[in-house]
Amino acid sequence: MSIHPTQFPAFDGLKVIAAFGIVWFHTPHAIGREIGYAGLVIFLLISFIILNTRPQSNTTYLKYLQQRGKRLLLPWVFWSIFYGLIAMRQSYSFHEFSLSGILTGTTIHLWYLPFAFLASFSVFTILKLTEKISTRLLVIIGTIVLILWLIVYPIFETMFTSSPWRQWNYGAVSIPLGITLGQALKLPPKQRYEIMLTIAIMMVILSVYLAQMNQFGTGVSYMIGTIFVIIALLVPVF
């Protein structure tokens, strides 16, 4: 079943909400600012879900890398230079030369762009390699990976404490989640609703688990972000 991205008109409004969430999160001392980080989850899920709706067989790996590189890496280079010049003017010190420093750029806030580039390419690769696998099986595998990933997330959090690895660990959860939601859209309506309702309930349970593991921010932001995206997918908007 082929689904065109224009069938998601609610995504436009959802992006506005997500943008406000990001601003909320970055506002110092804001009440409940952890909830605002759901905006990042929303942006990632929208990107991965739309990627699921496009036929991968018509695009080569190199062509996809070029397309995403132009969209994500060029802005990353531009803003790295911009903030780098500001840092030089204000006599700030740069990151030490390391892989983490390269991926971060000249400010930690730029971590999202190289992450989104590599994460979207990972989703593209997974979808391309699993084209012949049935949609239901891919949904099941994605759900299992998602559950296991969130269960061991607190362990990863203690392992990856430096930037941008901590941020990457957070964002990586959206990969199996985005694939699962995107593939669920290809199923008949009844099964689609059942699977997405199950995922929403599962995210609520996992958020409670993560809160008990001192990962309240991660749990609540993924729960809210996922529920918002599911609503946007299932509720008709004209």
Image (spheres, helix red, strand yellow):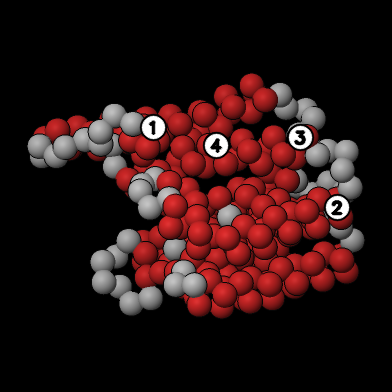
Name the disc covering residue 2, or none.
Answer: none
Q: Are marks 2 and 4 in contact (CB under 8 Å)?
A: no
Name the disc covering residue 118, or none.
Answer: 4
Q: Secondary structure at mark 3?
A: helix
Q: Which badge, 2 or 3, is on the more N-terminal residue?
A: 3
Residue sitting at x 55%, y 50%: 172
Q: Nearer the viewer, mark 2 or mark 1?
A: 1
Name the disc covering residue 128, or none.
Answer: 3
- Residue 202 image point, x, y percent: 68, 72
Name the disc covering residue 137, or none.
Answer: 2
Q: Which badge, 3 or 1, is on the more N-terminal residue?
A: 1
Amino acid under label 1? Answer: Leu
Q: Secondary structure at mark 4?
A: helix
The alpha-carbon separation of the residues under discs 2 and 3 comes to 15 Å
Instruction: Establish if 215 lies above or below 108.
Output: below
Residue sitting at x 51%, y 33%: 71
Q: Which badge, 4 or 3, is on the more N-terminal residue?
A: 4
The alpha-carbon separation of the residues under discs 4 and 3 comes to 15 Å
Amino acid under label 3? Answer: Lys
Local crowd size for mark 2, using a 10 Å CA cut-off: few (<14), some (14–19), many (≥20): few
Amino acid under label 4? Answer: Leu
Q: Nearer the viewer, mark 2 or mark 3?
A: 2
The alpha-carbon separation of the residues under discs 2 and 4 comes to 25 Å
The alpha-carbon separation of the residues under discs 3 and 1 comes to 28 Å
Is residue 127 visible in the rendered structure shown here? Answer: yes
